[in-house]
Amino acid sequence: MIKTLLKSVREYKKPAIITPMFMVLEVLCECLMPLCMAKMVNEVQVATDSALTPILKYGGFLILFAALSLMSGVMAGKFAAKASCGFAKNLRQDLFYSVQKFSFADVDKFSTSSLVTRLTTDVTNTQQAFQMCLRIVVRVPLQFIFAIIMSFSINAKLAVVFVLVVPFILTILLSIMRYVMPFFRKIFKKYDALNNSIQENVGGIRVVKSFVREGYENEKFQKAAGQVRDDFMKAEKILALNTPTMTFFVNFAAILISFLGAKMIIDLGTLEGPFSTGDLSALTTYGVQMLSCLMMFSMVFVMLTMSFESARRISEVLEQKSNIVSPENAVTEVKDGSIRFENVNFKYSENADKYALSDINLDIKSGETVGILGGTGSSKSTLIQLIPRLYDCTDGAVFVGGLNVKDYDLKALRKEVAVVLQKNVLFSGTIKENLRWGDESASDEELVRVCKLAQAHEFINGFPDGYDTYIEQGGTNVSGGQKQRLCIARALLRKPKILILDDSTSAVDTKTDALIRKAFAEEIPNTTKIIIAQRVASVESADKIILLDGGKIIACGNHNELMGSSEIYREIYEEQTKKNSDDSEKGGNE
């Protein structure tokens, strides 16, 4: 896990290495100051002429050490901040890049809300932990070791008191960590649930308001937030034992050293003996430094305890290897738009009880127009997602241009297979910018051409800014039908060998739908077109119509063939034709 995270340090290795160097200098200066102070006190007590000489002599050293310590601390803070901020930037970038490589199955595994939490809250926690590691985690052991060495050099018998206290403190710290870690693991899972609640509410705010469900959503959010609060409180109650416990042991050790040291000085009966007042002062300071190091470590330990779970969750994403990758020596050119499904079975996860698709055998020639009909949940969208390898089939094989899709370079394959998904997505930016997702170098004339094919040119010209009209996030300032036509135009700009429309004309009227299909037939005859639709009229003129039910192909043929051979298709056609006829009569009577 640590090795995975440290790969994100990269160009910030230099400040990450320099920071501990300044910390060493700072700690060294702080450890020399008590010794310098002790010598000054001892020499002042025994001075026969003037006490000013040792004060000036050692005072100069104290000022020098203090200045060096200040300078080192400032520089360590500066480089630590640079290294930790750069590390966090790289970590977010690496996480984002990893997510971009995920297959649909990988995204399903983590969930959108969980990935957002990992990119935000978890990265922030890990950044703070990294900065503390560079400064305090380096400082604490160094200062502890220096303080022990200096304490034993002054008086080994008294220094043992501090050493004996350490095991008690470490035992308490480890016990707290053992009990707290499970709570933080639960907390971050509930953070995901909290973010999921927010995401659902914001994404479906129109539905929430339409059904007047604000109260229900408030209760749901309050419940999720309350669960996070409760687990945090349980964890904090345990962590609250940390500071008072540390303080007790530090004060206890300092009092014990002061008592034993004072008794030793009194028993010696002289200020010039082997253990003097200055030595006691230095030893007490070193003892406090040692135990303060442990107190400081206990504070860092709280942050590290929280960030450990965050680091684990980040590593989980970074170490996730997508199950859909380009093979070695991948084919980079798709010959044509022919498609073949050969004994294909598919299920979304290995543990799934049933297949979403089963026994799929299908042959589509290049340039053909194929319609797919089926009820909700019949796996129409799942079928077409296997063609550009958005998912991989569980059994069997899918062929495009005569080759197994697994033999192609992913970018090359997906460049030739343009998919207009069921959920149309536009990004914030102008219409031109959205269209050029299909081809970044497309000219204005090409944009107009594809928009005419998609029946979008007319309504675009109706906007005051035309093709420079700004699209709000999610395309909220255009209608559903307009959004669909813009997405179709964007896909056409790719000049693909295979064009897949996944129920992409459901929000347009039948007249516009017919015009789009007519334009396809006339303008892109060599492109294989797969149209998923709910209306028979949308696929009636297709070369081949596939009827899906329960993830299986139950009928296949052109309109005339299916009217004669498939009772289900005939019922659908007659029902929709009758409904359209009734609607027309009602409109005429009105």
Image (tube, rainbow, N blue to C red):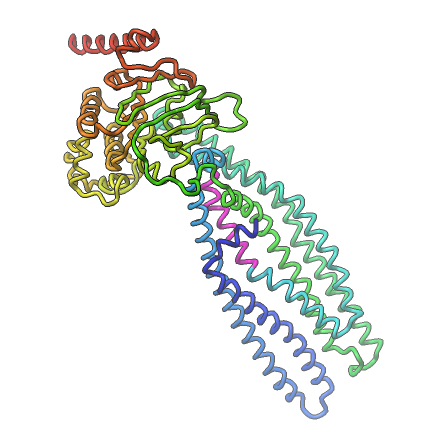
Q: Which of 395 and 220 lies nearest the eye of the viewer?
A: 395
Residue depicted at x 42% and y 46%: 97
Q: How many marks?
A: 0
Q: Which of 242 and 541 lies nearest the eye of the viewer?
A: 541
Residue 128, compared with residue 403, is above or below; it is below
Residue depicted at x 51% and y 62%: 16
Q: Which residues are magenta?
A: 114-133
Residue 66, compared with residue 143, is above or below; it is below
**Image quadrant in which you'd find residue 129:** bottom right
Q: Residue furthest right?
A: 267
Q: Which of 568 and 130 lies nearest the eye of the viewer?
A: 568
Q: Is residue 11 left or right of residue 363?
A: right
**Image quadrant in which you'd find residue 343:** top left
Image x and y of residue 405, in percent: 39, 33
Image x and y of residue 543, in percent: 26, 19
Q: Is residue 127 magenta?
A: yes
Residue 396, compared with residue 226, is above or below; it is above
Q: Is residue 139 magenta?
A: no
Image x and y of residue 335, in percent: 31, 34
SS assignment for the magenta stretch, majority: helix
Q: Is residue 525 left or right of residue 324?
A: left
Image quadrant in which the C terminus is located: top left
Q: Residue furthest bottom?
A: 49
Q: Which of 357 and 39 lies nearest the eye of the viewer?
A: 357
**Image quadrant in which you'd find residue 167:** bottom right
Residue 2, compared with residue 482, is above or below; it is below
Image x and y of residue 158, in percent: 78, 69
Q: Is residue 513 left or right of residue 187?
A: left
Residue depicted at x 40% and y 20%: 361
